[in-house]
Image: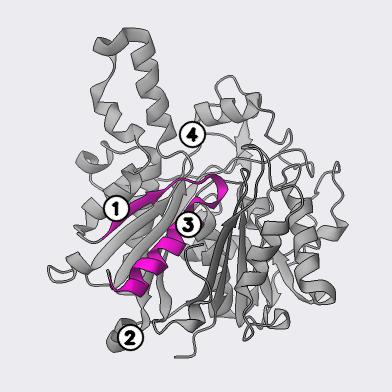
Amino acid sequence: MFFQNRIMNNVSIVVTGIGVISSLGIGREVFWKQFLEGRTGIRPLKEISSLESPITFGGEVPGFKPKEYLSPMVYRKMGRASRLSVAASIEAVSDAGLTIDEAGQDRIGVVVGTGYGNSGLTDDFFLSFMEGGAQGANPLLFADTVPNTAASHISLYHKLRGPLTTFCQNLISSELALAYACQVLDSGQAEAMLVGGADELSPILLHAFSVFKALNPSPNPILGKGIILGEGACILVLERAEKVLARGARIYGEIRNCVLNSGVTQPVQFEGEGNEMKKAVSGCLSPENEPEEVELIGLSANFSKDLDRLEYAVLKKVFGAKLPQIALSPLKYFSGEFAGMGTLRLAALLLAIRDQIIPPSVNPSELVPGKPWDRAFIPARSGPVTQALLTGFSFGGGNACLLVKKPTY
């Protein structure tokens, strides 16, 4: 557990900037509009080959052009995940009104969560190694085979010298990045952090997930039959509240609590009984944050065999009879799943707080495993949204929950 009960500490941590590159659209406002309208980012693949996988659809980012953000000399040295990340960071920094000058470069850090990093270039490098041996391997590709590349590219682009870290923990990679960033800010090691999550769709990922039979066979997903892979990047600017107030910046929301734990299970399975999941959710609800005060939950649900059913069972135990009064929003149903999308799901909650709009939601008790989803969701509607909960559960037993609150500053 990194930290718990953020309200007990003296430092308030707030989100001031959001940058989004997603299958639902490029740019924060485009993404939000598409999501509110109930659009889907799941479509036939155009830019990415499906290799030997029978799956030819996914949550691919449409029409992303790195030259609109970076010079060719810069982006040609990056893999797709890094390009998506840097582009999202540019929007986030601009949105926050954050001035990165010589004096501030030492006080701003970067932390990114990713499941697989630049998997496309990683595959290209190992293919060149397999075909040509050590002498035939392409050395120009090697630097992008490590998962911390996206965070490093963000730091290099903005010329930052603060803390620089990457987390890889399956489906809660960027939730861990958020928790760590809050810890860094709380300890005073930085005044602002660029926090993100990113992953790319690639032939090798589609092939690997297909071999494990983990992918849904239909673009109109069959409930419980597997995930639909997606891609994207979302960077958030987190700052210590006193600095934000001093410069008069807009605040999307305050991160109140964060709880991390794990359950004992197999590497490719979710925690069987959900006992630790329940503790993570309950731990985010301090005496001041009673269940009835949470109006919106950003679900971790992703069409997989066990997660959706288990998550709903856990929420029923925690919230009881109050659960039907809470909007349950499954962004992954609309955008596809990628391991680093915790920040994107948090961005949706923050935008809901900003606009006092509840995004498309579902009643999981009506979703029967084995049947097509048929995109039966409750349309977006007016709030109020004063507190929202982000649930993050991963195969292998990792759990992460965050509570965000409407700013009162």
Mark 3 or 4: the one toward you: 3
Circle 3: residue type = Leu
Q: CA distance from mark 1 to mark 3?
A: 18 Å
Q: Circle 3 — which element? A: helix
Q: Circle 1 — which element? A: helix
Magenta residues (range)? 163-188
Circle 4: residue type = Glu
Circle 2: residue type = Glu
The residue to which callout 1 is attached is 154
Q: CA distance from mark 4 to mark 1?
A: 24 Å
Q: CA distance from mark 2 to mark 1?
A: 25 Å
Q: CA distance from mark 4 to mark 2?
A: 44 Å
Membership of 286 in magenta stretch? no
Q: Which residue: 33% across, 50% down?
A: 151
Circle 1: residue type = Ile
Label 2 vs 1, first from the N-terminus? 1
Lateral position of residue 315 relative to residue 148, left or right: right
Q: Circle 2 — which element? A: helix
Give whichever of 301, 256 is nearer the camera.
256
The residue to which callout 4 is attached is 47
Question: Which label was assigned to residue 176?
Answer: 3
Q: Which residue: 38% across, 12% down?
A: 130
Q: CA distance from mark 2 to mark 3?
A: 24 Å
Q: Position of residue 373 (x, y in %)?
A: 80, 48
